[in-house]
Amino acid sequence: MTTLPGKYADFEGLRAQVIALRRQGLSRRQIRDRAHIDNNDLLNRLLEGEPPPEWTKRPNAKDDLRDRARELRLKGLTYDQIQIELGCSKSSISLWVRDLPKPDRRDAKEQAKLAARKRWDHELAVRDEARRRTKAAAAREIGALTDRDLFMVGVALYWAEGAKDKPYDRRENVAFINSDAGVILTYRAWLKLLGVQDEHMRYRVMIHETADIESAERYWADLVGIDVSTLQRTTLKKHNPRTVRKNTGEEYRGCLVIRVSRSSELYRRIEGWWSGITRLFTSGKV
């Protein structure tokens, strides 16, 4: 039987009291205050073998990371490899897996490859951040667009991406196709600037036959603010098994074709506008 001097002389009686309080769900602080124990070492001895109540266990946001780190360690990964995989500090990894067996030491070539990978990952991150800053700064340089700015942008955009009349193929109508949402919205804003009404715009999706056609139709309809049922019949591109396509996945939505009905006069004006722009350069006036 353990005996202690002073007010803690009855160790077993005190332990029985402390255990009873613990089983009532009290925390260490509550037990210490209730039993008037101001010695932490003694409290540890009194509570030895008695688990804390669930409510006193703090949730740990890194529980999933810790479990994953232990799985990787058991597979033979080193601290460096686990750090690359999970993105956490090596000091945390050391605490989580220190009771597990150490993997075989890597050879010098593997260490060199890992070091090179870490340097390259860092370099890529630096480049990505520099790229992001450059784009953000350039976007701020644009500022507000005047109607004339939009007019000139639209003329150039159409002549680069829109359908054009040829001497051998007369096509004096306004038709535009593109896969970029920003380009589509800019083009529509330009048409509205020119006075083209919504009811004169016709929309059609053009997409590879193996893609998610319904999802693409909903995407384009939502983008231009129309009901999907008003889209014209989708044009499907036939699959060539000898071709390795790169435009796949959830982000692939094909292209949107926008036609303006009864637009031969508008087309002639667009061609004239473009001719007026380029004449300034071909004549040497600019």
Image (cartoon, grey):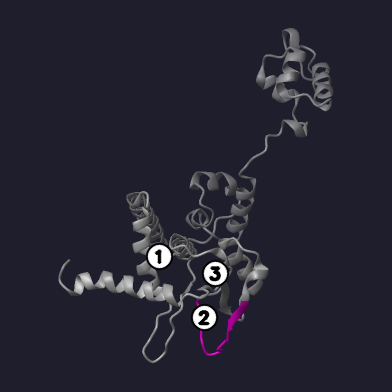
Q: Is residue 102 magenta?
A: no
SS at circle 1 = helix
Which kind of residue does numbered mark 3 sit on? Met
Q: What stretch is highlighted in magenta?
A: 233-246
Q: Residue at x 49, y 48 (%)?
A: 90
Q: Quadrant of the N terminus?
A: top right
The answer to whether any part of residue 152 appears in the image is yes
Q: Distance between the residues labelled 3 and 2?
A: 31 Å
Query: What label sits on residue 113 in the rendered view?
Result: 1
* Residue closest to the eye, 127 or 257: 257
Badge 1: residue crowd in 10 Å (few <14, some 14–19, many ≥20): few
Q: In this view, does 213 lie to the left or right of 15?
A: left
Q: Which residue is drawn at 61% across and 78% down?
A: 234
SS at circle 3 = strand
Mark positioned earlier in the residue sequence (1 or 2): 1
Q: In this view, does 62 lie to the left or right of 28?
A: left
- Residue position for label 2: 245
Residue 279 place in picture, x, y as percent: 23, 73
Magenta segment main secondary structure = loop
- Residue position for label 3: 201
Mark positioned earlier in the residue sequence (3 or 2): 3
Mark positioned earlier in the residue sequence (1 or 3): 1
Which kind of residue does numbered mark 1 sit on? Lys
Residue 163 place in picture, x, y as percent: 43, 79
Q: Which residue is drawn at 74% across and 12% down?
A: 36
